[in-house]
Amino acid sequence: MLPNREELLERVSEAVRRAGALFGDRELAEQIRQKGVTDFVTQVDLTVQEQLRGALRTIAPEVQFMGEEQDNSGLDFGGAVWILDPVDGTMNLIHGFRHSAVSLALAEGGEVTMALVYDPFADELFTALAGRGAFCNGRPISVSGAERLADALVDVGTNPSEREKADRMFRWMRGIYDRCHDVRRMGAASLCLAYVAAGRLDAYVEDGLKPWDYAAGMLLVREAGGMAATPEGAEPSLEHGGGIAAANRRIGPDFLKLLSEA
């Protein structure tokens, strides 16, 4: 039996903060293994994942575990599953660009019910429980009040490990740039979604992601009053990954329409 959700969130938050402290260890960050042409894993990724796997097993041993740095075949999404990205923004971490996060979600019966995104560089912990709202360091957050895409600041992810999708993503970027205040590209999907939830960005889109990139951030946006869907407007998969688009609900329909036309 899982603890009550408030108690569970408190205990997991402590574990996530402890693990996030490892982001500042440059010796670990500089121990790098290449998984693909532009896809890397550092010893920070591996150590954070193992530390959190152990902590989560102690806190809730009955919950399955999906982590970026492991084989995730055989998981039953009809039950409860932790979905972890130990370092979202590994490329940023390697380069000392201080914009990375631990992203952790709890899915139950195929729905995300708990979200934590922790940026240790800013010491900001974004959290949400389904139906309870979204928070940053315990304070409520909400999506922006922008009413037009023309007034929006939008992050467009380029996903360097999925370069075959570059033409589509740069078409999106140009189409969005022509119709908004400006575009950003910060390199950590979970934090982009958290920033939409906090009203710092008005919208965000990226393709070719994995469930651990967006599972937590998706709940944050929804609990903060926004919309999160695939760029085609469908429900994002927690098993297979894909694209994600998020915005406040005022500009969301126009944002999805623009993506479909670009």
Image (cartoon, rainbow, N blue to C red):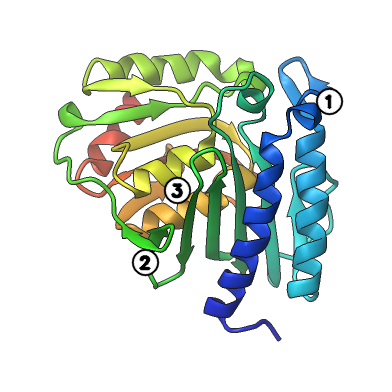
> Is residue 252 in sight in this rendering?
yes
Image coordinates for residue 141, horizontal then vertical, percent? 32, 56
Q: Residue at x 53, y 27 (%)?
A: 187
- Given residues 162 and 117, the one toward you in this image is 117
- Within 10 angstroms of label 2, few (less than 14), some, or many (20 or more) residues? some
- Given residues 225 and 251, the one toward you in this image is 225
Q: Is residue 65 above or below residue 122?
A: below
Image coordinates for residue 99, horizontal then vertical, percent? 53, 31
| Location of the C terminus (image quadrant) | top left
Q: Which residue is mark 3?
A: 234
Q: Is residue 17 above or below residue 29?
A: below
Q: Secondary structure at mark 2?
A: loop
Q: Which mark is residue 133?
A: 2
User: Which amino acid type is shown beneath numbered disc 2?
Assistant: Gly
In which image quadrant can residue 170 be found? top left
Q: Secondary structure at mark 3?
A: loop
Q: Earlier in the sequence, mark 2 or mark 1?
A: 1
Image coordinates for residue 168, horizontal then vertical, percent? 47, 18
- Within 10 angstroms of label 3, few (less than 14), some, or many (20 or more) residues? few
Q: Residue at x 73, y 28 (%)?
A: 26
Viewer-nearest of labels 2 and 3? Answer: 2
Find the distance from the CA under tag 2 to the CA under tag 1. 38 Å
Viewer-nearest of labels 2 and 1? Answer: 1
Q: Earlier in the sequence, mark 2 or mark 3?
A: 2
